[in-house]
Image (spheres, rainbow, N blue to C red):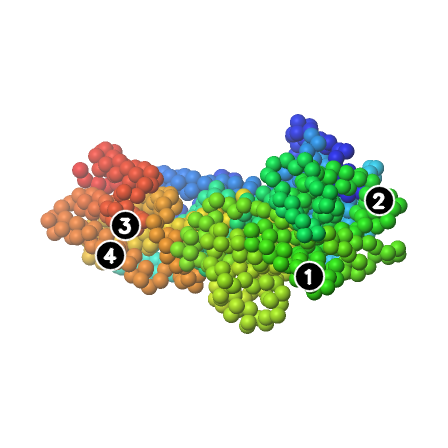
């Protein structure tokens, strides 16, 4: 069975123009994702909100009173509130849709003879799709070439065991899923082992998945801890509001004898107490926060990750491609004590004594290489040894890297010739495979140490022979001969040292987890400023520790070397058991359990597998460590701004409720009618969802320790502060009201003076709750603030000066 790359080179696939033409005819390769939230559906959801229902009740009472103008005004106010809410919700929906577009699965296809990544939704029939271990199959396809391809079809068949696939270069009618050696793969299934090349024959609803009617959604609307807390606050407010509303209606009716006016006063108070903004603000902040973070190269797949970002205390990161540029190249070769340093640039030839090693290193690498190290080896082999692997060679068997032996071997056969075994891996693992005597092993490891101290990633290479008959189940059953060492370089990303310093200042401990040699890991840590450097824990040393011992060791060590993916889960659990909030990066199939277990799983978007991306909360679109730090900064900013908005909401309801209740108790002229509360709501809603959401991060946002995730949104001190602010605003409005009443001012003039003071105090409250607070907040840039404040003052000026509007609001000049 030929390896994939050989078959691929003979195929050109569809042209981009033909694919685009077919996409218009066939439609997108996607399944229905549930009902879309159209503007009409959003409007229907908003009409059922308590605030709108209370305003409708007030309008009905005005109709009973014969005040048609007030009823029409309330109807217009409801329309205005719905318009503002629709804009907010539409903005949120667009942000969520943008995230869904970003998180749509990607597929590797061959078009115009070149491999290219496209959105899986753009696939069409007869597209050639490359199938790689760890990826989801994007559409139903016929396998035209494969090497040891096994697929998990449990999503369709319910059978947990992977099924082996064969290849068929000729068209065949597609069968039902299930069964061994079928030359077909199906959308939604998972490539467990091997690789292949498929020709798509069905997309979207025409796939087996589409026939079953499954619906997959990339971003779910799951409830978060904050949403639960906000719901509790809303319930408390609603219960208090209904109780006080009934009491006010009863009190006013008994005192005045006008029960309709009593109900109107009670409903006005209820409107002032209904905290309908709380859940809206939370939804808007989390959705727009996720959208802002995606613009920094980090995709949010699960909303709770936004909450947890600001609480992260430990950040576990890979080395290759995350801390480094992921641009590996072979820099040094060593064979038989001879060393050859490769100059940068194109390689013309490799000295004779190193050619066998380079050739066997290429044979030991994945034919469909995506690992940067294997890509570098293939590049050197193609440039220096173009005939290292003739096209008529077959890959017979692959022995993958394991926790027990950090080496991989591949068995090749040239037509009916003898079997050749090539192996590469950690120098100590290759020494074990070659059964080196202790003296030779010590010399080998010293040479590897010397290369690692120069910051090179070091691998050993060996070749073996296979006896006739069945191949052994384990690679250490072959007879191997050592060929030499290869040193690969990968420069660090320029922004990483500064990002590490920023994490240190923010109280976040950075931990590097790598499969590299300990000396290589230590050298990279030295370059990026990771501390401490004196302790490195290897995978073998980790195996010898029990869970309690690992917890103690993890407190002291920041560099973990020779770690296999399965050991990452133990590390995550060790950090969590010590009370840390853990963020973990990963890219492979075996990383999925650790990503799922971590508080914040971060998958690599560029080199990560679909399984890793599905298990993660965040996806790093550019695989850059500094993007994680920017996401943490934005996560802290989102939570800070959310607290400000909630504090403002808590405070602003105090004077509104107070000025709706106190005049009733004092039997004085009513200040707030439903139309006035609507006016205030028109200021409050944009202030929360636009002004506070757009607030820049505070200067010290990354110079303070992480937030305690168990700390509530409203603690006692914050509630007390909000109540104090609200009481101060109420005191101002009440003082104006009492003074005007004491001076014998008419009702409409009292209302004008009191309402104007409430609007001005409201704008002051916005400034107080901004970043920095008070007049210093005016120096902080936020264009939305000036739009909201300017619009509020302009409308206030109109309702105070234009006779028609003044009469509607029952104001005096």
- At numbered mark 2, what does the secondary structure look like: helix, strand or loop? strand
User: Which numbered dot is residue 196?
Assistant: none
First reached walking from the N terminus: tag 1 or tag 4 = 1
Q: What is the tally of numbered marks visible in this picture?
A: 4
Task: Assign the C terminus to one quadrant of the image.
Answer: top left
- At numbered mark 3, what does the secondary structure look like: helix, strand or loop? loop
- At numbered mark 1, what does the secondary structure look like: helix, strand or loop? helix
- Which residue has dot 2 on it? 414
Q: Residue at x 52, y 47 (%)?
A: 492
Task: Assign the N terminus to one quadrant of the image.
Answer: top right
* Residue 64, quarter of picture: top left
Task: Report if residue 574 is visible in the image.
Answer: yes
In the displayed structure, would residue 163 be above or below residue 795? below
User: Which numbered dot is residue 441?
Assistant: 1
Contact check, label 2 and label 3, Cβ < 8 Å: no
- Which residue has dot 4 on it? 727
Q: Nearer the viewer, mark 2 or mark 4?
A: 2
First reached walking from the N terminus: tag 2 or tag 3 = 2
Contact check, label 2 and label 4, Cβ < 8 Å: no
Is residue 463 found left or right of 428 in the rendered image? right
User: Which numbered dot is residue 773?
Assistant: 3
Determine the CA span between mark 3 and mark 1: 67 Å
């Amino acid at each position: 069975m030929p390896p994939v790359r050989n078959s691929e080179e003979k195929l050109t696939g569809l042209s981009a123009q033909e694919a685009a033409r077919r996409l218009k005819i066939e439609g997108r390769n996607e399944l229905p994702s549930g009902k879309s939230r159209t503007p009409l559906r959003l409007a229907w959801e908003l009409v059922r909100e308590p605030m709108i229902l209370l305003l409708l009740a007030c309008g009905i009472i005005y109709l009973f009173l014969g005040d048609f103008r007030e009823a029409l005004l309330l109807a217009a106010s409801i329309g205005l509130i719905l318009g503002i809410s629709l804009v907010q919700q539409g903005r949120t929906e667009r942000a969520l849709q943008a995230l869904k577009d970003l998180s749509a699965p990607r597929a590797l296809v061959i078009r115009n003879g070149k491999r290219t990544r496209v959105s899986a939704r753009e696939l069409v029939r007869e597209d050639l799709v490359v199938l790689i271990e760890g990826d989801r199959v994007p559409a139903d396809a016929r396998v035209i070439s494969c090497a040891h391809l096994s697929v998990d079809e449990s999503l369709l068949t319910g059978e947990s065991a992977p099924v082996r696939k064969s290849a068929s270069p000729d068209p065949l009618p597609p069968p039902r899923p299930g069964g061994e050696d079928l030359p077909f793969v199906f959308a939604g299934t998972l490539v467990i082992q091997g690789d292949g090349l498929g020709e798509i024959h069905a997309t979207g609803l025409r796939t087996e998945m589409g026939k079953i009617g499954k619906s997959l959604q990339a971003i779910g609307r799951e409830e978060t801890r904050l949403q639960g807390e906000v719901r509790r606050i809303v319930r408390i407010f609603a219960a208090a509001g209904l109780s006080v509303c009934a009491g006010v209606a009863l009190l006013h009716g008994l005192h005045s004898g006008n029960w309709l006016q009593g109900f109107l006063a009670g409903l006005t108070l209820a409107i002032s107490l209904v905290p309908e903004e709380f859940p809206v603000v939370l939804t808007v902040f989390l959705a727009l926060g996720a959208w802002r973070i995606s613009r920094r190269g980090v995709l949010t797949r699960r909303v709770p990750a936004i909450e947890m970002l600001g609480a992260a205390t430990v950040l576990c990161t890979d080395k290759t491609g995350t801390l480094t540029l992921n641009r590996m190249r072979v820099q040094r070769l060593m064979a038989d004590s001879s060393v050859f340093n490769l100059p940068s640039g194109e390689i013309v030839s490799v000295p004779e004594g190193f050619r066998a090693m380079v050739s066997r290193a290429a044979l030991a690498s994945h034919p469909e290489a995506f690992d940067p190290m294997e890509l570098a080896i293939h590049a050197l082999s193609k440039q220096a040894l173009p005939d290292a692997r003739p096209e008529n060679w077959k890959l017979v068997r692959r022995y993958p890297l394991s926790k027990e032996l950090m080496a991989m071997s591949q068995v090749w056969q040239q037509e009916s010739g003898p079997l050749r075994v090539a192996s590469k891996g950690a120098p100590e693992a290759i020494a074990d495979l070659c059964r080196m005597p202790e003296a030779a092993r010590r010399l080998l490891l010293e040479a590897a140490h010397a290369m690692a101290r120069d910051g090179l990633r070091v691998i050993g290479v060996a070749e073996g022979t296979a006896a006739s008959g069945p191949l052994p189940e384990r690679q250490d059953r072959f007879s191997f001969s050592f060929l030499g060492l290869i040193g690969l370089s990968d420069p660090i990303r320029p922004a990483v040292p500064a990002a590490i310093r920023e994490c240190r200042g923010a109280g976040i401990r950075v931990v590097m987890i790598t499969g590299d040699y300990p000396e290589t890991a230590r050298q990279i840590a030295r370059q990026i400023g990771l501390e401490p450097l004196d302790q490195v824990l290897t995978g073998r040393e980790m195996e010898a520790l029990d869970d309690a011992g690992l917890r103690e060791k993890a407190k002291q060590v920041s560099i973990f070397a020779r770690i296999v993916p399965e050991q990452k889960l133990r590390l995550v659990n060790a950090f969590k058991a010590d009370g840390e909030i853990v963020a973990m990066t990963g890219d492979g199939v075996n990383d999925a359990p650790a990503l799922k277990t971590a508080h914040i799983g971060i998958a690599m978007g560029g080199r990560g597998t679909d399984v890793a991306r599905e298990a993660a909360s965040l996806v790093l679109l550019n695989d850059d460590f500094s993007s994680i730090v920017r996401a943490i900064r934005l996560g802290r900013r989102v939570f800070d701004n959310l607290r400000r908005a909630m504090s403002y909401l808590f405070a602003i309801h105090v004077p509104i409720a107070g000025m709706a209740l106190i005049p009733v108790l004092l039997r004085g002229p009513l200040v707030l009618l439903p139309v006035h509360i609507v006016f205030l709501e028109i200021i409050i809603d944009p202030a929360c969802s636009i002004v506070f959401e757009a607030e820049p991060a505070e200067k010290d946002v990354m110079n303070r320790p992480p937030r305690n995730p168990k700390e509530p949104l409203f603690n006692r001190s914050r509630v007390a502060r909000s109540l104090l602010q609200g009481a101060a605003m109420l005191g101002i409005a009440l003082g104006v009201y009492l003074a005007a009443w004491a001076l014998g001012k008419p009702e409409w003039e009292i209302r004008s003076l009191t309402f104007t003071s409430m609007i001005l105090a409201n704008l002051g409250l916005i400034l107080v709750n901004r970043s920095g607070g008070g007049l210093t907040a005016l120096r902080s840039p936020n264009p939305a603030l000036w739009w909201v404040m300017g619009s509020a003052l302009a409308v206030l000026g109109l309702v105070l000066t234009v006779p028609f509007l003044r009469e509607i609001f029952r104001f005096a000049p």
